[in-house]
Image: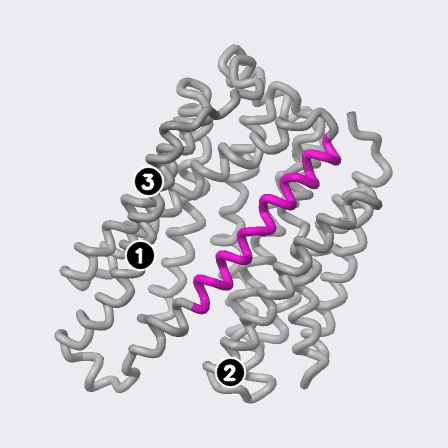
Amino acid sequence: MSDNQTYFIKFAFYVSYFCFSLPAFFFIKKHAYKNGIILGLMLYASGATLFFPAASFTSYTFYLTAIYIMAAGCAFLETVANPYILSMEDDINTGIRKLNLAQSFNPAGAILGITICNTLVLSTLDTNTSISENLEIVREELDTITIIYAALGQILLVFMMILLFMNVPSYGSTLIKETPFFKSLKRLFNDKTFVFGLITMFLYLGAQVGTWTFTTQTIGDVLSKTYEQASDLYIVTIIFFLIGRFLFTFLMKYYRPQVLLLANAIAAFFCALIVMLSSGYVLLTALIGISFFMSMMFATIFGYALCNSKVDRQLGGALLIMAISGGAVITPIQETVANSFDSQTSFIIPALCFLTVTFFAVHLVYKKTE
């Protein structure tokens, strides 16, 4: 694939969050949380199943469509789950701690996914150009990917069937149904903390996606590692992201989440600067540090952005999930810097994003939330 084709895979995934978060909100508003989760699982499973015809037609566009539909399922699930977890608790700090705990299992899935990719997919690919132009070999390689995604789709359908027989408490869904959309929207955008949090979420997702996009390239360029070696070190950064999520969730029992967010945002900012200015294992340590200090940011920004939202929480949550599209917007800016200078210099973009997270955390520390 060309660089543009590679970019549009990320773009299709993250822009799907922007397109489907509000529809997910309206669906939940009419049909309740449980049905929203079921529809999200169906969309994800449908996207995964579309990998079969995509492989048959060896079509890039078909694969792009499948990924877009999978991401739509993710958008539904996140729009339902994150505000739902917050609504389980009256105390916002406790709700944020629970949301961080729930989010802690995401990087575990990411590590499993990377491991499966390296073991079952990348190891089967032949990078010889003359061989890869052979249609039979291309289809054989695509079949490996297709089987993995199709299996994932079937597993999700099993979860969906289990969910059909489960009781899911409403936690205020009646209030959501009774709240007019435009009045709710107006209240949210009159809340400075929510607006600041929405902007911060957009920029944070850009920093996260950009950091992970350029981690492997930076390790390869600066440390002269092969792609396989750089990929192994990339997994290390995700492992520290996982460790950070569980560690900071534990620390929230003893320290206010907004104080931890401030400390982590400052640390991530300086780690990004160190990546720009250093080399060798100092640079590697800084890359690991960024992932470690990013670990609690998503759930904590999400929770505090909604701290004053009350009956508008579900709509606010949908808008924050839309902000995940920052991964599609900020990353090409970082790529432009990398192409103009180098991958190290491009970390100025995540550094500026972490600076915004720092200002948001300062706002939270000195502002009394209701």
Q: Label 3's element?
A: helix
Rendering quarter of residue 263: bottom right
Which residue is outermost to the bottom?
224
Residue topped by disc 2: 229
Q: Is residue 193 magenta?
A: no
Q: Nearer the viewer, mark 3 or mark 1?
A: 1
**Magenta part of the chain:** 92-115
From this view, report whether residue 19 is shown above or below residue 207: above
Q: Disc 2 to disc 1, how far (Cα)?
A: 25 Å
Q: Which residue is mark 1?
A: 149
Q: Nearer the viewer, residue 41 or 169?
A: 169
Residue 126 in view of the camera: yes
Mark toward the start of the polypeptide (2 vs 3): 3
Left or right relative to 209: residue 146: left
Q: Per the image, is 104 magenta?
A: yes
Q: Main secondary structure of the magenta part?
A: helix
- Name the residue that disc number 3 marks: 43
Residue at 52% over, 60% down:
331
State the CA–CA distance, disc 3 to disc 1: 13 Å
Q: Are marks 3 and 1 in contact (CB under 8 Å)?
A: no
Amino acid marked by disc 2: Gln
Name the quadrant containing residue 346.
bottom right
Quarter holding the C terminus is top right
Check disc 2 and report its element: helix, strand or loop. helix
Q: Earlier in the sequence, mark 3 or mark 1?
A: 3
